[in-house]
Amino acid sequence: MFNGRVVLIIIIAVMMLVSCSTTKKVPAGDALYTGADIKVDGPGLTPRKKKELRKDLESLTRPRPNQKVLGIPFKLLLNNSRLFRRRLGEPPVLLSTLNLGHNVDLLQNSLENRGYFHAKVSGDTVVRRKKATAKYTAETGPQYRIAQVFLPEDSSALSQTVRESAGKTFLKTGDAFDLAIVKGERTRIDNYLKERGYYYFSEDFILLRVDSTIGNNMVNMHVTVKRETPQESKMVYHINDVYIYPNYDLRQNQTDTARQMADFYKGYYVVDVGKQFKPRLFSESMQFNPGDIYNRADHNQTISRLVNLNLFKFVKNRFETVNPSDTARLNAFYYLTPFPRKSLRAELNAHTKSNNQTGSAITVGWKNRNTLRGGELLAIDFTAGFEVQYSGQQKGFNTFSIGGDINFTTPRFLSPFHISNKGGFVPRTKFLVGFELLTKHKLYTMQSFRFGFGYNWRESFQKEHDLNIISINYVQPLEITQLYKDSALINPTLLKAVEEQFILGTNYNYNYNQMVGKPLMSGGMYFNGNIDLSGNIMGLATGANAKNNNQKEIFNAPFSQYIRLELDLRKYVKLSPTMVWANRLINGIGVPYGNSTQLPYIKQFFVGGTNSLRAFRSRSVGPGSYRDTISTSFPPDQSGDIKLEINSELRIKLAGIVHGAIFIDAGNIWLFNEDTLKPGSKFSGDFINQLAVGGGVGLRFDVNFFVIRFDVAFPFRMWYPDGKEWVLNNISFHNSDWRKRNIVFNLGIGYPF
């Protein structure tokens, strides 16, 4: 049994260690600086507003105190150790480094910038037992608000354009004055003008004057254009000629002679002496035409599309004013340095799984960029790998695989219908042909064929769509060993993994990821939704009905008929600069009908393992309340048509590349239809009571591009009903037999989600 007294003793010991060790390295006559305590008061301030101001002001004070995790300054404690001081330790932040007067001025300026023009801030320090806190008192006074906003009134085209943008202004009558919003308004006006041809304009030419003399704690805002603004910045520019150099060498100087050799195609000059690219490729990438008014959005989207082609390792451009300059025209030049057209690569990776399987794979790939001179990519990959189990029930049941894929993509929509091709990202039409031969030693050998045709496109960096119009999977067993056949006589559910399958359908995937380009310890949301349809037309044409023993076949294999939906929602909440709370909900449902009573095996759901329920062996949980107690030479994988999984993980940066985690996982799978061989496996209203729950702790070693993860987990609750679903009261870490049966070690690459 788990002894709570032991935990209490450990907690008391840690508290005593912290209290006596944090000031060990503090010099005589100095004190450990523990941070700032700010009291905010003022007329009309709500408790919520006070809390917001206090938090913002505290973030401005310097120095920052020593970092803490769960209230404990671990790095400061490690500084006391000779072994860890250099790599993981952090010296104490001392009171002597505090500049109280500077902080007072900083806080007062911050309040004035927020419209508290009569704010007063005072500060002092309190020292007790060699620990010091800075105490600040902020009296805000009344906050000034915006009475009126006045825009330029002259008749110039520039001032008229500024007035046209008034509907999108950040300066709203009645809002509080805020210098940050004022600066944002200057940037907004500049962006608005850039979108309307004012190429040489700058936000520095915008002046916002504040009149605080009108009384009643109100201000008037006057938006003006500086008198010294250059004439060229007041002009609307049009695109004149566009020159594209697709074979540009950074070391060479493009001359007018080379420009004279350009091909003119749909308004663009393509300087491609070797004719390596079809001019059509660039007319599809350019987001503006000669004669158009310059705007920043088209300019940025053109650069983005050229980069997104994945043909050029360097993309740069410049604009040049056409002489005479008073014509307000720009010549555009694009200099593109291509990647090598053909490349060969080899990848070797190793992995380990929670079911003690360790493996490796090698991939040899060949790429031909610009295959047909129109930006097409032909990629051929050949992969061979293996997995061996060095201990446990599956020892000796090793897995070997060999296969290859041929991918062909074009940077455009190939369709008989016109599809809009605007935006900063290049759409792609993709074709896939693949093959795999899988051998599970002592069990079976399977071969599978894949074919796909579809489209991939992005709305933005955060939103991506993937539509496969045709997706074909054909799985066929080549050999089934006598051992597997004998095991299937004992446990007929094993036949599911080796059944012949033919899947012909369509699927669509939508991905929304706020975490793109953000650092690891940031907050945000991730969503992935997938819908998969199979066998609908064939089912209607053949009248297939498996429940009435009228199952139809294609190529001597029953074709699958189902609707499958899967949603993956993740939320990352930033609790502090070194702490993130990560949560994931995965919900999937497959509805087999017509020619199928269950989803095909390769489309079913599984839970348990390194990236799922980490306290349970891979693919061992469920379905439903079913528990496989049939004794065979190897444990079968459990699969289902419905899935519910919830994960929650507190991630903490400890020191350098070392991160820690505390996590809890829950979930299960179910069948859509009743299976007499698996009683309790059908989804029902009692699904909550059938969830398996586990948790644990982990370490991650994160070097940005590569993460090694080590997790230790154990079950809290089992999914099968034997009167002992909750097993928390059975925890006994000192018992070797309990540890052997319950503790699961996971070694993984990357974060679980």
Image: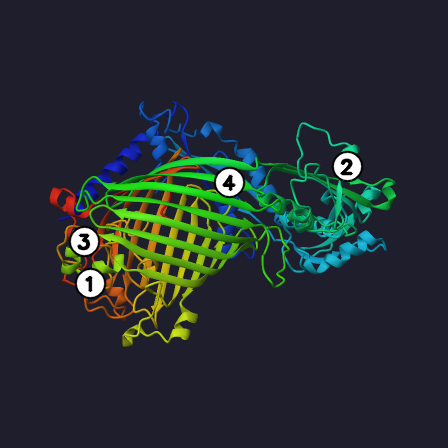
Mark sitting earlier along the chain (2/1): 2
Discs 3, 2 touching: Cβ within 8 Å: no
205 vs 159: above or below: above
Percent across and percent down for residue 518 are 50, 44
Mark sitting earlier along the chain (2/4): 2
Residue type beneath disc 4: Lys
Q: Which residue is mark 4?
A: 367
Discs 2, 1 touching: Cβ within 8 Å: no
As rendered, which of 543 and 107 lies closer to the eye?
A: 543
Q: Residue furthest front?
A: 555
Percent across and percent down for residue 704 are 44, 37
Discs 4, 3 touching: Cβ within 8 Å: no
321 vs 254: above or below: below
Kindly tell me whether residue 564 is visible in this rendering: yes
Q: Which residue is mark 1?
A: 626
Discs 2, 4 touching: Cβ within 8 Å: no
Q: Which residue is mark 2?
A: 259
Viewer-side label of 2, 1: 2
Percent across and percent down for residue 631 are 12, 55
